[in-house]
Amino acid sequence: LAAAVLAAAVGIGWFLLRPAAVPFEPLSIVANEQGAQLWRVEARADRGSLRVTVAGVIPPQPGRSYELWALPEEGDPVSLGLLPEAGEAVRDLTPAQVAALGRSRKVAVSLEPFGGSPQPVPTGPVLYVAEFVEVAG
């Protein structure tokens, strides 16, 4: 009985003391020229993780990949990874990606060779540019 009480106390303590997950907040909505949403981009408040959700019909591009880029106000674009063509993708960002997002007010989507740009900048056409959303606070 004592072991069961101890295990329950440890479990409850862990549950109460564990850090709360930082929620995702809207970052940007990528839309086509007609205004139809394609992807919703969300970031944690610390910008350490991104969640990208397909929000519309993504035009198929056999043998190609859509890649998301942070567009710092100064300097070159920084890749934030490949975009999903269905469902959603969640990824942790590197310190360089976090820094680039901190200096950005926009993201872009380029069409790259399968697997992404072979260079640290877009090599394919930039198809979409989207500003960060303003969150009321």
Image (cartoon, rainbow, N blue to C red):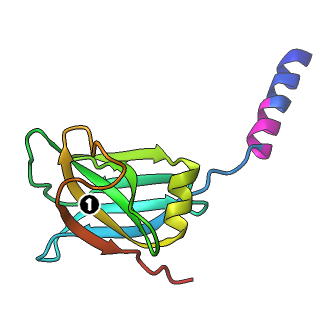
**Residue at figure coordinates x 14%, y 55% from the top left:** 58
Q: Is residue 111 magenta?
A: no
Which picture quadrant has residue 9?
Answer: top right
- 59 or 62, nearer to the observer: 62
Q: Is residue 83 above or below residue 114?
A: below
- Residue 1 appears in the figure: no
Residue marked by disc 1: 109
Q: Is residue 99 left or right of residue 110?
A: right
- 9 or 75, nearer to the observer: 75
**Residue at figure coordinates x 50%, y 54% from the top left:** 97
Q: Is residue 18 above or below residue 69?
A: above
Q: Position of residue 104 (x, y in %)?
A: 46, 71
- Quarter of the rendering occupied by the N terminus: top right
**Residue at figure coordinates x 55%, y 57% from the top left:** 98
Q: Is residue 16 magenta?
A: yes
Q: Position of residue 100 (x, y in %)?
A: 50, 62
- Residue 87 appears in the figure: yes
Q: Is residue 37 left or right of residue 34?
A: right
- 19 or 81, nearer to the observer: 81
Looking at the picture, which amino acid does disc 1 mark?
A: Val
- The tally of labels here is 1
Magenta segment: 11-17
- SS class, disc 1: strand
Q: Position of residue 23 (x, y in %)?
A: 56, 58
